[in-house]
Image (cartoon, coloured by chain):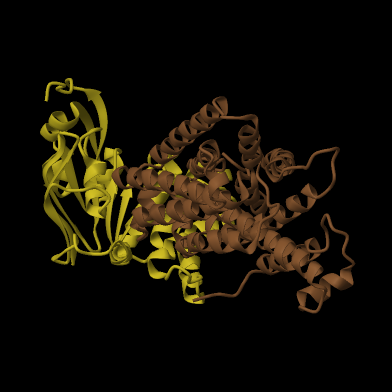
Chain colours: A yellow, B brown
């Protein structure tokens, strides 16, 4: 049971963004997609979601090609928490979360009691019940991130893709969001997260995929991906590492070179 | 399938019926209420019957259709473009429809063939629709759509100014100005049979867009990952509102502000969810336009108040008031 990207090529206006990227998200696992700015992380995520045209390669779900699927069928299987989580109207939190049920509704259909139940569960999971009647425009960044995650969870898709869900959040909310995503994997969902925080990536993900200049540089268990060589090659940084009992940690520590601008 | 109307929808429908009914009683000819009732039931003198059934009734029906089109299109466009300042004017349809009418007057077609104004202005609206649908097929960004609408609108407005500049005679200039100010006066059942199918056709095209508009409030990418076909949604809203508003302008002239103001009025009653605004906005638009048309029947000085002038004068202060009340929630 996996969501797979096979050898994805994406070119936007003569600019090759992805040059043969592959990854696999098994159910029950948290996969972290990491890489420097502009490496193609978000593009790969969008390709998987069907939001961008791919020149070659394919996306498969349990072995089945997704290109022929309707948007609605895709939406039932894969949900998406967008970067920055925009909301364009001052809508209340409960309403925003209920929008996550749209893939399961006909155009005129209203939310049923069963839907309401799922909405309630998602709000419990994300600890947003007390926000139900607040307008999303009045929420703090952390509250907002929890609400948008609840919105993605409520569609009850097998796979969830989150694009930088913890960017610009305080440490409490970063850990909170990662805990929720971890919990989803424990419940049997496949979770793919685009991340910049290498420490949290190492702490929470089962596997990492390191992408650099549109190609996968390394993938696999955390210690195999976050090697000193890979960090220098992709990020041009050195990390400081430490150990607490059996857990290994690292934190970006200093710059080791310059990005090559000629490529 | 859920078709239970909300309390607001019921209340607005009821108010619309009452206001529309009352507006049959007010007009230039002084007809006793009893005679009006018997005219409606076909038992009055023929002259009274003509005034009621062939002058006042078509005027009321057209007013309802026009107001509903403007209100509905305004709500749908604001939802689609995720912009509280959008209205049918912004996609350029009102201006090109007006241009069609002005061209018909300029070349004297209207003198040769009475329905040419209506036909030309519907043609203008369809032309704008065509350009917009080409743009929305090639490029998916909402900003491009707004900018294309502004471009079309400016070009049409410039052409209208050019036609006025070189108006063949003062009479036709007068006609153009009168047309651009909008009116429901002297409309007959012929106008309804001409524009009605397009107006209602536009509504039909727009049915079922509410869910997609709700999803769009989370941004275009997220809406797609909720299973919404954005291209189809965009086509439905743009073409539906262009056809219904174009047909409206073709029989009533330019009527501003209804499409802009009405969704804001409804928001202050039931919140911002774009899908929930659609039907109440159509009803509210119909009510507002019927009331505005009633106001044009008030004798003022030596002239006649024009509908577009009344809607702008009623609409803009109301708009400012709503913006003042809701400042802070919108960001």
Q: Is residue A41 visible?
A: yes
Q: Residue A198 at x, y = what percent? A: 26, 39
Residue B30 figure quarter: bottom right
User: Which residue sits at x=41%, y=37%?
Assistant: B148
Q: Compare residues B69 and A64 and report the one nearer the observer.
A: B69
Q: Quadrant of the C terminus of chain A?
A: top left
Q: Residue A167 at x, y = what percent? A: 38, 39
Q: Quadrant of the N terminus of chain A?
A: bottom left
| Label total for image | 0
Horizontally, residue A205 falls left or right of residue B185, namely left
Q: Is residue A179 visible?
A: no
User: Which residue sits at x=47%, y=75%?
Assistant: A114
Q: Residue A53 at x, y = what percent? A: 21, 48
Q: Residue B112 at x, y = what percent? A: 54, 47
User: Which residue sits at x=53%, y=50%?
Assistant: B113
Horizontally, residue B141 falls left or right of residue B209, namely left
Q: Is residue A145 above or below residue B172?
A: below
Q: Is residue B61 above or below residue B313?
A: below
User: Which residue sits at x=78%, y=42%?
Assistant: B304
Q: Compare residues B113 and A16 and report the one nearer the observer.
A: B113
Horizontally, residue A235 falls left or right of residue B301, namely left
Q: Compare residues A224 and B252 and report the one nearer the observer.
A: B252
């Amino acid at each position: 049971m996996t969501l797979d990207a096979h050898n994805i090529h994406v070119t936007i206006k003569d600019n090759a963004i992805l040059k043969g990227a592959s990854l696999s998200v098994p159910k029950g696992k948290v996969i972290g997609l990491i890489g420097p700015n502009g490496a193609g992380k978000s593009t790969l995520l969008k390709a998987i979601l069907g939001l961008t045209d791919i020149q070659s390669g394919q996306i498969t779900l349990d072995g089945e090609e997704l290109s022929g699927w309707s948007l609605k069928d895709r939406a039932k299987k894969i949900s998406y928490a967008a970067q920055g989580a925009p909301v364009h109207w001052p809508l209340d939190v409960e309403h925003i979360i209920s929008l996550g049920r749209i893939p399961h509704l006909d155009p005129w259909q209203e939310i049923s009691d069963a839907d309401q139940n799922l909405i309630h569960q998602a709000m419990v999971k994300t600890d947003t019940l007390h926000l139900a009647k607040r307008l999303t425009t009045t929420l703090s960044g952390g509250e907002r991130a929890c609400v948008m995650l609840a919105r993605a969870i409520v569609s009850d898709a097998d796979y969830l893709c989150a694009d930088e869900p913890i960017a610009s959040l305080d440490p409490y909310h970063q850990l909170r969001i990662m805990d929720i995503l971890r919990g989803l994997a424990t419940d049997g969902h496949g979770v793919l997260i685009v991340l910049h925080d290498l420490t949290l990536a190492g702490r929470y993900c089962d596997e990492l995929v390191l992408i650099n200049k549109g190609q996968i540089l390394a993938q696999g268990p955390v210690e195999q991906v976050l090697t000193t060589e890979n960090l220098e090659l992709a990020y041009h940084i050195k990390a400081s590492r430490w150990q607490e009992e059996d857990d290994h940690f690292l934190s970006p520590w200093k710059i080791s070179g310059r990005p090559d601008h000629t490529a | 399938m859920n078709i239970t109307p909300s309390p607001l929808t019921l209340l607005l429908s009821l108010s619309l019926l009452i206001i529309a009914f009352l507006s049959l009683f007010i007009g230039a000819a002084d007809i006793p209420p009893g005679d009006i009732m018997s005219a409606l039931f076909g038992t009055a003198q023929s002259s009274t019957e003509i005034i009621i059934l062939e002058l006042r009734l078509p005027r009321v029906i057209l007013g309802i259709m026009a107001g509903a089109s403007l209100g509905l299109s305004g709500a749908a466009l604001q939802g689609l473009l995720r912009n509280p300042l959008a209205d049918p004017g912004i996609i350029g349809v009102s201006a090109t429809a007006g241009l069609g009418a002005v061209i018909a007057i300029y070349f004297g077609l209207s003198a040769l063939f009475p329905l040419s104004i209506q036909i030309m202005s519907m043609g203008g609206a369809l032309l704008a629709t065509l350009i917009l649908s080409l743009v929305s097929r090639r490029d998916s960004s909402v900003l491009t759509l707004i900018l294309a609408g502004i471009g079309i609108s400016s070009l049409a407005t410039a052409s209208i100014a050019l036609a006025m500049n070189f108006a063949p005679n003062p009479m036709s200039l007068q006609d153009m100005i009168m047309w651009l100010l909008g009116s429901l006066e002297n409309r007959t059942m012929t106008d309804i049979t001409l524009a009605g199918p397009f107006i209602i056709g536009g509504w039909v095209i727009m049915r079922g867009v509410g869910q997609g508009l709700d999803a769009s409030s989370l941004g275009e990418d997220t809406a797609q990952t909720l299973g919404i076909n954005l291209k189809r949604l965009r086509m439905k809203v743009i073409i539906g509102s262009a056809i219904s508003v174009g047909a409206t302008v073709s029989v009533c002239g330019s009527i501003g502000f209804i499409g802009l103001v009405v969704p804001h009025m409804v928001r202050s009653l039931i919140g911002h969810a774009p899908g929930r605004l659609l039907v109440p906005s159509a009803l509210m638009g119909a009510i507002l336009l019927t009331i505005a048309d009633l106001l044009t029947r008030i004798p003022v000085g030596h002239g006649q108040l024009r509908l577009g002038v009344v809607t702008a004068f009623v609409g803009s202060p109301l708009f400012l008031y709503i913006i003042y009340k809701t400042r802070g929630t919108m960001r």
